[in-house]
Amino acid sequence: EIVLTQSPGTLSLSPGERGTLSCRASQSVSSNFLAWYQVKPGQAPRLLIYGASRRATGIPDRFSGSGSGTDFTLTISRLEPEDFALYYCQQYGSSPSTFGQGTKLEIK
Amino acid sequence: QVQLVESGGGLVKPGGSLRLSCEASGFTFSDYYMTWIRHAPGKGLEWLSYISGGSSGSRFINYADSVKGRFTISRDNAKNSLYLLMNSLRGEDTAVYFCARFHLAVTSFYEGRGYLSQGYFDYWGQGTLVTVSS
C-alpha cells in the first residue's frame, strides 16, 4: 500500500501568514488522485482539495493544492483564525486508499 | 444540503459487538457509494469500508484488512441509512467513527482481489465515539 508522509507534524504560524503543508507518497499516486481534508474536534471533517489541485465546493480560494507524482502541497495563502486545525492528505489512486498521519496547524 | 448523522457509538467490552448507523439527507442516497472511516486517539484517519449504491443484488463492498472478517457494512436505501456491524471488538478499535459520502473516481482490477473502487470523501458526518474497554 502507498504510505503518505506529511510534514511538518506541527506548524506554528500567526493569522495572516502563509501556511505550506507537505504530503509525500512512497510511490507515485496514480492520476494525481490526492485529496486534502480539514479536521476539527467535534466537527465533520471537510474536503478541501481533490485531484491534487481542484478546490471542493464552497472552499475559499486562499486554499490551494499543487504537486504531482509523489510530492504534493497544500497552501493556505493568508491564515484566518478558523484555519487552525488538523490537516490530512489522502491518496485514492490505488487500493487501499490511505491517509497521511496529519499536520497540526496551531496558532503561534 | 447534504447531512450525515451517525449514531450507535458507546462503551463496549473487548470481544463485544456494536452496530453503528448513519442517516443521510439532502441527496439521492441510492445513487452514491458510502463509506466508513475512523479516527483513533493520537492517530491518523483510517478508511474502513465502502459499499456501492444501487440494488442489493449488485452491490460492491470492500474492507480494510484491519477489519475484514469482523466488520460488516450494509445499507437500506428505503431508509436512507448506512450501517456498520462491528464484531470481536478490540481495544485498538477505540475511535471516532465517521460515515462519509464516497465520490467514485476509478474502479480498477487487482489480480487476486477483483474490481476495487477508489475515490475521495466529499461529505462527512460529525462522528460517533466507540470505546472498547473492560
Image: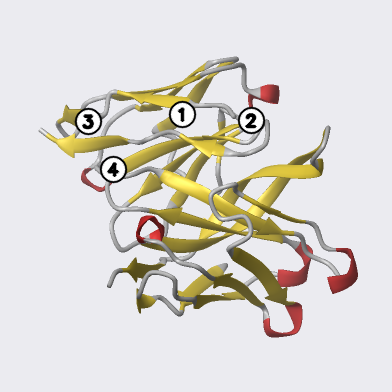
Q: Tag 2, which secondary structure?
A: loop
Residue under numbered circle 4: A83
Rendered position, B56 above or below B118: below
Q: How many marks?
A: 4
Q: Chain of mark 1?
A: A
Location of mark 2 (residue): A33
Is any atom of residue A58 visible in this view? no
Could you tell me which residue is drawn at 79 percent across and 41 percent down? Answer: B113
Dot 2: within a 10 Å radius of its alpha carbon, few (fewer than 14), some, or many (20 or more) residues?
Answer: many
Q: Residues within 10 Å of mark 3 (few under 14, many from 20)?
A: some
Mark 3 belongs to chain: A
Percent across and percent down for residue A77 are 33, 27
Q: Between tags 4 and 3, which lies in front? A: 3
Q: How far is disc 4 from disc 3 in space, using C-alphas?
A: 14 Å
Amino acid beneath label 2? Phe
Query: Between disc 2 and disc 3, whose residue precedes?
Result: 3
* Residue B42 sits above or below residue A50 on the image: below
Q: Are marks 3 and 1 in contact (CB under 8 Å)?
A: no
Mark 4 / mark 1, whichever is N-terminal: 1
Q: CA distance from mark 4 to mark 2?
A: 24 Å
| Residue A82 vs residue B134, the one in the foreground | B134
Q: Position of residue A66 (x, y in %)?
A: 51, 21
Kind of residue indicated by mark 4:
Asp
Badge 1 amino acid = Ser
Q: Secondary structure at mark 1?
A: strand
Looking at the image, is mark 2 or mark 1 earlier in the sequence? 2
| Quarter of the rendering containing residue A29 | top right
Q: Are marks 4 and 2 in contact (CB under 8 Å)?
A: no
The answer to whether marks 2 and 1 mark residues whose Cβ atoms lie closer than 8 Å is no
